[in-house]
Structures are given as structure tokens and as C-alpha cells.
Image: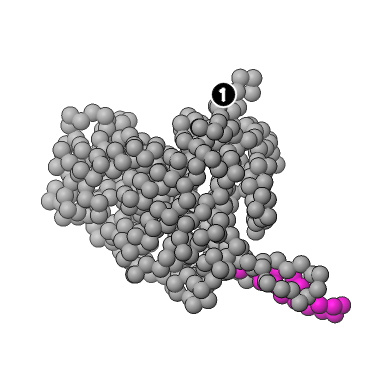
């Protein structure tokens, strides 16, 4: 049985405290942790927003947000305790004249852990950090959390890091990627370095290739304007997918200390082979969904979501990306990593597939032997699956069949975390940055991504249409077929 360890008293300030992220993720995560008794009675949660809202109105707003998102029966006893922690402060982040109202609900002596969570536009990160410092709210116990994306490219990311780093020490900065809070991602370390079975096989000698898929069945919806400026490469590959790649490809860290782990991740990032204009057509695919059927319901295409059916928005923004990435180091040289992510795909799915090399010689005649696969499932359910060839029971000859060995986390363990944000928030409060990105990781990722964007621009690479409810454009299948491989059938 897992045990929930209480955290020290804290003040948690959420900038953008009435926004979408706070409503969907942060407040439900904090409520769940409070329900398991991890917070002291005097810990406080302070929401900062531009809107004028009385305390009672804010508490009612939080209650409504939680009731729609808490699994099971809403616990009134927990709510009564949680409501006592809540405060709301009206503050215009663009106005630096007077931030004294923010100091009122905080511990005046600065003895508690003080966390500033910036669920705002990245362009405000440096501004908020500077004004917190000017208001005298930054001390040795302060920490700042930066939501993704940190910047729009390498130059903007470096500018943000410089501005925040001028106020906060690097050890106080937590750049969040919620995929790193998922149990399966962390279990990569346990699988590789806690078992003698996998580590000798976790290399080019045994692994034919690796596939990383992050598929969503939803469209861009209300995020159309954001996607117009960003696209899937910046939104998903630069952070989530490159972090997953680093976790599965890195060497063994010296220990579980956060800098030992992040030192190994940055080595992978720096070993990524640049994707240049000369080869970008062969190793990348851009896609954009059109109208189709998802869950038996007709849905609009991307351009129609930004306009109307009669006058769709003009756009060549990608909602799908597939890449062939290569790591130029001793362990992985010659082993491709295929990445794909997209909106309005056939279903919601996040998984990492290790396909091992086929047996060198079959003694079973003409029967096809499927290569072994290790599948790490991140969502919708977390777990690990290993496929093996086995003999079918019964008479009538020697027939071979591929079958899975399953480790389903919800079935195997009695305690689960409903959302990765719960774990990440607790790690911030404990002062453990191992599951967060360091400055050099962010900037190295942007350097690799910027090269792809520049190559697309120089070669005039356009998006390929794919029907909503499919697994992406035909060219994404050609990407693997060109190498004599195919995307794994989702389990």
C-alpha cells in the first residue's frame, strides 16, 4: 500500500487562478491531495486574477468547478476544510504599481514554503517574476512554477529564462511538463534500472526501433487562435514528446538525485541528429485534419473550427506531426525513434513501443513470427505490456501465436493518482525538481525544433490533410514504410 506523506505548511499562489488550467487540473488535484490528508490546517491557496470577485463568490466558483470534476461522491467534510484555505486577489499583472494586496494572505514572516504557479501566457513570466521581487515576496523559501510552453522558439525561451533567472535561483524554478508526472513515465526508470532483464536489451543491438505516439481525439476547439500561432510541433513535440524520448533513451543516472537524472536527459537532447532542409521531406510529415467522424459523431475540420463551413479560416498550421528522430550516440546509433502526435485522431492514446529485432532464424517453417514488443501505456490507462510468441494449445500441429503479458496499474495497485498534476504539485511543495525541466533542457529542445521549422519553411513543406477519426495522413505511414516498418497497432 502506498502511503501519503504530508507536506510542510505552504502558501500556494496561482496566477491565472480562475482560468481553464486552474479549473480543470490544479484545483481538483489540490482537492484530492487535501482529501488524503497531505496538507496542514494552516496551508493556503491564493488565486490571482484580473476579474473582480468577492471571497464568497470565488469559493462558490471553486465548489462548482470541483463538483463537475471529482470522481465519486463529493466529500463535504473535505470541502469544508479545503474552502478555508481559499483566497482570491484581484490583480492586473500588466500593472506593476501596487502588489501589496497579494502579500496580505501570505505568511508575513516568510517561514513557509511559498510557491508561485504561473498559469499565464509565457510572455508574462519575466514580468511577474520581477514584480514579485519588487514587492518583496521572493525569499529563500520561494519557488516559481512555469507552465509550458516556455517561449515560442530558442530566442524567446532564453529571454524568459534570463528574466526569471534574474530573480529566482535555478534550484527554485520548476518548469512543468505534466507527462513527467505520469506513473508509467517514472516506471521507465524502475523497469530499466531495477530489473536485470531489460537493461542489456535496451540498446541498438536488440531494439529495431522505438515508436512514441501521443494521439488526441479532440480538436483544437477554443484553442484555435493559440494553434494558429503554435502548431503541433511546438505544442506537443518540443516538450511532451522530447521528454518521453529522453526518459526512454538516457543512460543510467548515478543516483535518483534530480541533477543526475537531468544530466542524462540533456545528453540525449544534445545527441539528437539535426533535421536539415536537405532531408526534411523524408523524415517529417505535417498534417491537418478535415471533417470526419469521431466516436460516431460528425466533427468539423480544423479550418472550419476557426471560421465557418461557408468561409473556413485560411491556415496551413499543422495539427499532426510525424518525425523520424535519430540519436547519434553509442547506445542508439542506427536505431530510429518514430514520433507522432495529432488532434482528432481515431482515439485518445499515449504509448511508447519498443520493437525488438526479429529472431535470426525460424525453426517453425513458414509460420510468421512477430517481433517482441514492449509497450508502455500512458493513457487512457497506465500499464506495461510485453508481447511474446507462444504455441497455441491443442492438437492439429504446432501453431505459433503472439500473446501479451500485461501489467495494468489500476488492477495491480490499490492506490492511483487520477492526474499527473497531483504528483507534480506535491513535488514542488517538497522541493524536488527531478520531474521538472532544467533550463538547458528547454533551450536544447528549442534548438532542435527551430531547425525543423526553418527546414519546413525553406523547403515549403505543406500540411497533408487527414480525415478526423483516422490515424493521420497517408504520408505518415509512408514514413515508416520507406524503412520497411509500420506503426504498431494500438492495443
Residue 459, position as x, y percentages in the image:
54, 33
Residue 491 image offset from top left, x and y in percent: 65, 59
Image quarter of residue 334: bottom right
Q: Secondary structure at mark 1?
A: loop
Identify the residue shown where x is 38% and y is 61%: 264
The reply to whether residue 26 is visible in this rendering is no
> Front-most of 220 and 241?
241
Q: Is residue 397 above or below residue 49?
A: below
**From the viewer's perspective, is residue 71 above or below residue 61?**
below
Pick out the residue farthest to the right: 396
As drawn, is 253 to the left or to the right of 70? left
Magenta: main secondary structure: strand
Question: Relative to 334, does residue 300 appear above or below in the rendering?
Answer: above
Of residue 248 and residue 28, the one placed in the foreground of this image is 248
Q: Which residues are magenta?
A: 384-404
> Which residue is depicted at the point 43% across and 45% down?
448
Left or right: residue 254 versus residue 211 is left
Which quadrant of the figure contains the N terminus?
bottom left
Tell me, yes or no, whether the highlighted magenta stretch contains residue 401: yes
Q: Quadrant of residue 402?
A: bottom right
Q: Is residue 53 left or right of residue 243?
A: left
| Picture residue at 67% right of the left edge, 46% below the top | 478
Expressed as whole percent of the image width and height from the top left, the position of residue 187 reads 47, 66
- Location of residue 162 in the rendering, given as x and y in whole percent from the top left corner: 25, 42
**Res. 285 visible in picture:** yes
Q: Residues within 10 Å of mark 1 (few under 14, many from 20)?
A: some
Residue under label 1, please give it. 313
Relative placement, left or right, of 364 versus 313 is right
Vertical comparison of 289 with 312: above or below = below
Amino acid at each position: 500500500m502506498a502511503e501519503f506523506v504530508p507536506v510542510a505548511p505552504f502558501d500556494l499562489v496561482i496566477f491565472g487562478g480562475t482560468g481553464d488550467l486552474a479549473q480543470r487540473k490544479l484545483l481538483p488535484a489540490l482537492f484530492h491531495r487535501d482529501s488524503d490528508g497531505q496538507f496542514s490546517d494552516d496551508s493556503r491557496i491564493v488565486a490571482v486574477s484580473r476579474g473582480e470577485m468577492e471571497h464568497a463568490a470565488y469559493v462558490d466558483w471553486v465548489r462548482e468547478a470541483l463538483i463537475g470534476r471529482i470522481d465519486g461522491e463529493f466529500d463535504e467534510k473535505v470541502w469544508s476544510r479545503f474552502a478555508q484555505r481559499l483566497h482570491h486577489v484581484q490583480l492586473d499583472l500588466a500593472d506593476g504599481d501596487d502588489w501589496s494586496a497579494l502579500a496580505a494572505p501570505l505568511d508575513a514572516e516568510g517561514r513557509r514554503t511559498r510557491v508561485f504557479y504561473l498559469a499565464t501566457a509565457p510572455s508574462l513570466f519575466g514580468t511577474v517574476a520581477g514584480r514579485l521581487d519588487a514587492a518583496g515576496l521572493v525569499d529563500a523559501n520561494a519557488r516559481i512554477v512555469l507552465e509550458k510552453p516556455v517561449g515560442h522558439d530558442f530566442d524567446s525561451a532564453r529571454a524568459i529564462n534570463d528574466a526569471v533567472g534574474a530573480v529566482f535561483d535555478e534550484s527554485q524554478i520548476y518548469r512543468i511538463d505534466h507527462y513527467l508526472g505520469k506513473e508509467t513515465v517514472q516506471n521507465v526508470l524502475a523497469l530499466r534500472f531495477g530489473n536485470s532483464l531489460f537493461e542489456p536489451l535496451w540498446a541498438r543491438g536488440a531494439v529495431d526501433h522505438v515508436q512514441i505516439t501521443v494521439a488526441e481525439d479532440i480538436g483544437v476547439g477554443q484553442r484555435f487562435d493559440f494553434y494558429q500561432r503554435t502548431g503541433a510541433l511546438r505544442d506537443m513535440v518540443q516538450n511532451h514528446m522530447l521528454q518521453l524520448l529522453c526518459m526512454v533513451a538516457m543512460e543510467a543516472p548515478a543516483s535518483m538525485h534530480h541533477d543526475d537524472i537531468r544530466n542524462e536527459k540533456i545528453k540525449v537532447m544534445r545527441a539528437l541528429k539535426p533535421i536539415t532542409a536537405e532531408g526534411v521531406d523524408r523524415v517529417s510529415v505535417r498534417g491537418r485534419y478535415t471533417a470526419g467522424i469521431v466516436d460516431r459523431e460528425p466533427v468539423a475540420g480544423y479550418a472550419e473550427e476557426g471560421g465557418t463551413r461557408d468561409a473556413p479560416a485560411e491556415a496551413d498550421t499543422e495539427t499532426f506531426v510525424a518525425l523520424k528522430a535519430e540519436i547519434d550516440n553509442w547506445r542508439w546509433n542506427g536505431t530510429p525513434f518514430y514520433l507522432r502526435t495529432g488532434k482528432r485522431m481515431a482515439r485518445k492514446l499515449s504509448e511508447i513501443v519498443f520493437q525488438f529485432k526479429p529472431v535470426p532464424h525460424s525453426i517453425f517453417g513458414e509460420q510468421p513470427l512477430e517481433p517482441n514488443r514492449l509497450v508502455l501505456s500512458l493513457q487512457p490507462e497506465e500499464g506495461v505490456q510485453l508481447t511474446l510468441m507462444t504455441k497455441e494449445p491443442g492438437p492439429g500441429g504446432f501453431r505459433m501465436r503472439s500473446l501479451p503479458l500485461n501489467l495494468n496499474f489500476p488492477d495491480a495497485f490499490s492506490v492511483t493518482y487520477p492526474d499527473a498534476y497531483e504528483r507534480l504539485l506535491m513535488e514542488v511543495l517538497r522541493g524536488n525538481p527531478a520531474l521538472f525541466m532544467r533550463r538547458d533542457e528547454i533551450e536544447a529542445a528549442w534548438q532542435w525544433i527551430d531547425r525543423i521549422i526553418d527546414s519546413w519553411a525553406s523547403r515549403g513543406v505543406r500540411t497533408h490533410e487527414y480525415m478526423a477519426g483516422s490515424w493521420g495522413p497517408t504520408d505518415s505511414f509512408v514514413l515508416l514504410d520507406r524503412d520497411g516498418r509500420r506503426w504498431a497497432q494500438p492495443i
